[in-house]
Image (tube, rainbow, N blue to C red):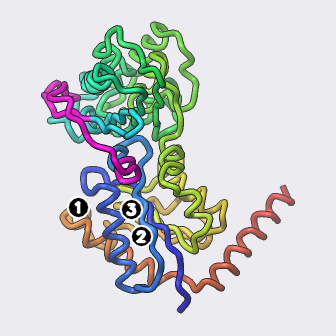
């Protein structure tokens, strides 16, 4: 059996495991069947939960700094923190202090990003040179107004602010923050309409372009922080570059990624979609391991998908021991992998098929 170079690059499994923990479990399962393969473990994030973990994992000499108690998304005090990088950059992760799992009870209208602004203010007051703000996993749909209120008259640090988004949705409309994401935060149809009106008022008040891709991230927090002076960019692409993921995939025989739920939103700016795109671009077979899998997603012919819920039998069983089922999924993925020559032949067939389709079009 030929030795393979395998890149293992999952996102976090929200509310269950960090990306680092998930990657380690998948790697353990893979090694149990193919112990001689070269595994490159690169935990990832896309601006949402786990962004600080992924950056800390990649940059030696970084350290966490407490912001003390800040306002949680439902008003309950929570611990705030940011990550200091050796070059004077502060990394702030919205999910850490304003994320949906922090809600005592779902409150799509009342949830706020105030705590995000409080941590950012604390970092600015400490004298950081520049800032990275990861947006994703938000409990609120407030257009970032809670964060802006907490920032007060503070301006971005001298080196600027990069806003990492995990979706490419605009602020308003049927593909926007309220219509697509508010129902996940507990909003019914009446709430969605009210939140859409709120965001439209935010757009009128701030006056910057609400149609730009990514402004709808984190309940529109990206829109508010863009107006404040931040620059929106893809969180998945940023962290992939930081960790060397894209280069690693280009030299790999197999790529493995994963997240809590793999569905149509996964290909709209999120980490798993980025890994799939890079694997397809380099003709590298892809494995997607997720808590649950929507099998209607268009994937390359060489792709594997593994659902932890299907492996465990029930959602409760999968959640009770996710490490175990990730190990099982990693083992099964390794068992189904093709030899290097077969991979090359199959990849070539896929390329020829795509070229033929493009010619016919």
Residue drawn at (49%, 82%), measured in percent from left and top?
Answer: 336
Say which of 180 and 48 sits in front. Answer: 48
Q: Which residues are magenta?
A: 55-81
Q: On screen, 299 above or below 79? A: below
> Which element carries disc 3, helix, strand or loop?
strand
Where residue 187 sits in the image (x, y, percent)?
Answer: 31, 31
Q: Is residue 78 magenta?
A: yes
Residue drawn at (40%, 49%), measured in percent from left and top?
Answer: 59
Q: Is residue 168 magenta?
A: no
- Judge from the rendering whether residue 286 lies leftward or rightward of residue 157; answer left or right: right
Q: Earlier in the sequence, mark 1 or mark 2?
A: 2
Where residue 155 sits in the image (x, y, percent)?
Answer: 40, 14
Say which of 36 and 302 sits in front. Answer: 36
Q: Residue furthest right?
A: 359
Q: Quadrant of residue 188?
A: top left
Residue drawn at (44%, 77%), measured in percent from left and top?
Answer: 333
Mark 1 highlights which residue?
A: 319
In 3D space, how far apart are the residues under numbered discs 3 and 1 (Cα atoms)?
Answer: 12 Å
Where residue 86 sits in the image (x, y, percent)?
Answer: 38, 40
In 3D space, how far apart are the residues under numbered discs 1 and 2 (Cα atoms)?
Answer: 15 Å
Q: Are marks 3 and 1 in contact (CB under 8 Å)?
A: no
Say which of 297 and 94 sits in front. Answer: 94
Mark 3 highlights which residue?
A: 290
Q: On screen, 348 above or below 185? A: below
- Judge from the rendering whether residue 127 lies leftward or rightward of residue 266; answer left or right: left
Mark 2 highlights which residue?
A: 306
Q: Residues within 10 Å of mark 2 (few under 14, many from 20)?
A: many
Q: Are marks 2 and 3 in contact (CB under 8 Å)?
A: yes
Q: Does residue 238 appear in the picture of this structure? A: yes
Assign the C terminus to one quadrant of the image: bottom right
């Amino acid at each position: 059996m030929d030795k393979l170079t395998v890149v293992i690059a999952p996102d976090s499994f929200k509310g269950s495991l960090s990306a680092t923990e998930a990657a380690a479990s998948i790697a353990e399962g893979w090694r149990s069947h193919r112990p001689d393969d070269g595994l490159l473990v690169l935990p990832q994030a896309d601006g949402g939960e786990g962004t600080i973990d992924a950056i800390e994992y990649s940059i030696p000499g970084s350290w966490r700094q407490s912001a003390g108690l800040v306002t949680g998304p439902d008003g309950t005090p929570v611990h705030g923190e940011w990550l200091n990088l050796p070059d004077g950059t502060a990394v702030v992760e919205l999910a850490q202090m304003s994320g949906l799992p922090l809600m005592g009870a779902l409150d799509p209208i009342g949830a706020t990003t105030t705590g995000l602004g409080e941590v950012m203010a604390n970092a600015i007051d400490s004298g950081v040179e520049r800032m990275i703000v990861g947006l994703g996993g938000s409990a609120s749909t407030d257009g970032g107004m809670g964060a802006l209120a907490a920032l007060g008259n503070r301006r971005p640090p001298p080196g600027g602010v990069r806003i990492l988004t995990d979706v490419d949705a605009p602020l308003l409309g049927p593909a926007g923050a309220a219509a697509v994401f508010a129902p996940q935060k507990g909003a019914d149809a009446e709430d969605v309409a009210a939140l859409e009106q709120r965001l439209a008022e935010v757009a009128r008040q701030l006056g910057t372009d609400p149609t730009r891709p990514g402004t709808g991230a984190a309940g529109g927090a990206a829109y508010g922080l863009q107006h404040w002076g931040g620059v929106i960019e893809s969180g998945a692409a940023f962290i992939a570059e930081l960790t060397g993921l894209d280069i690693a995939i280009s030299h790999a025989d197999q790529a493995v990624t994963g997240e809590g739920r793999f569905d149509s939103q996964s290909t709209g700016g999120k980490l798993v979609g980025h890994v799939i795109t890079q694997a397809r671009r380099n003709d590298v077979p892809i494995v997607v391991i997720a808590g649950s899998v929507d099998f209607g997603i268009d994937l390359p012919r060489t792709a594997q998908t593994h659902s932890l819920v299907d492996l465990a039998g029930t959602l409760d069983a999968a959640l009770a021991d996710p490490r175990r089922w990730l190990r099982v999924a990693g083992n099964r993925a390794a068992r189904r992998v093709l030899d290097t020559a077969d991979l090359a032949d199959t990849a070539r067939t896929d390329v020829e098929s795509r070229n033929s389709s493009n010619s016919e079009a």
